[in-house]
Amino acid sequence: MAQIDNNTTIIMIRDFYRNIIYKAKYNLTEDECERAILDACRFFGMPAPVLIKNLTNEPQGSTCFSNRDPNSFYDDVLCYNLKELKSLGVDGYVGFTAVFTHECAHRLFQNRLLPGPDFGQWEHELVADYFMGVRAALQDMDITKVTDGLAQTMGSGTHPTGTLRREYILYGKQEGYMHRIKNIDASAEDYFQLFLEYRLRHLQELHAAEMRVY
């Protein structure tokens, strides 16, 4: 039987107790967080990020996606802050992986030009929210808490108003559900085109909300 050295044992004990602490505080262990992120990546058929960072204890830590090359998945970094996510209603695996469906949609469309003010800043967020809804419907996930949490957020130059975000999540759920019951296998690009059609149909409402911020 292979021997485990003292340093490895110390690391294993440290990680074990850290997971217990995180489970007690956030109903999530770091292992579950990593699995939830990788499951979101698999949903889009993309590789794992080059790095997953837990920024929960960082003063300025936030849940986000970052990269250097917008034409590559292989330098993408995914970060999470469980304190921030808990305030949005994330209290378990489903909510966490839903949020990272949003972040992975950013990965997927990181080099896509979208219409709208500030290089389509709001549209990039809305398409990511929309795909959160699509996946929730396709995989029968209840993301009500996350959706309700996002609905309470205020609009800014970087993120749409919560009411708009909720609307696009629900539209994604609608499309995902229809494809699921009809057993239609649609690609991410197919869903993206449906997003653009929905945006166009609701352009007046979107512009009115954007004008209050921009």
Image (cartoon, rainbow, N blue to C red):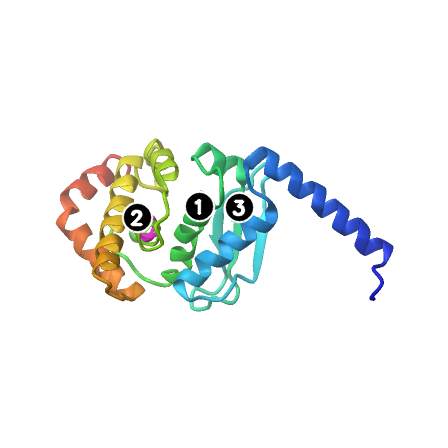
Is residue 157 a member of the stretch shown in magenta?
no
* Residue stretch in magenta: 124-131
Q: Nearer the viewer, mark 2 or mark 1?
A: 1
Label 3: which secondary element: strand
Real-space Cα separation, disc 2 to disc 1, in angstroms: 20 Å
The answer to whether residue 123 is visible is yes
Label 2: which secondary element: helix
In the displayed structure, 184 sits above or below 143; it is: below
Q: Are marks 2 and 1 in contact (CB under 8 Å)?
A: no
* Amino acid type assigned to the residue bearing label 2 in the image: Leu
User: Percent position (x, y) of residue 7?
Assistant: 83, 54
Q: Give the residue at mark 1.
A: 94
* Amino acid type assigned to the residue bearing label 3 in the image: Tyr
Q: Residue at x 26, y 44 (%)?
A: 170
Is residue 125 a member of the stretch shown in magenta?
yes
Label 1: which secondary element: helix
Real-space Cα separation, disc 1 to disc 3, in angstroms: 15 Å
Q: Give the residue at mark 3.
A: 80
Q: Residues within 10 Å of mark 2 (few under 14, many from 20)?
A: many
Q: Residue at x 37, y 47 (%)?
A: 141
Q: Main secondary structure of the magenta part?
A: helix
Q: Which mark is residue 54?
A: none
In the displayed structure, 187 sits above or below 194; it is: below
In the displayed structure, 122 sits above or below 184; it is: above
In the image, farthest residue toward the front? 1
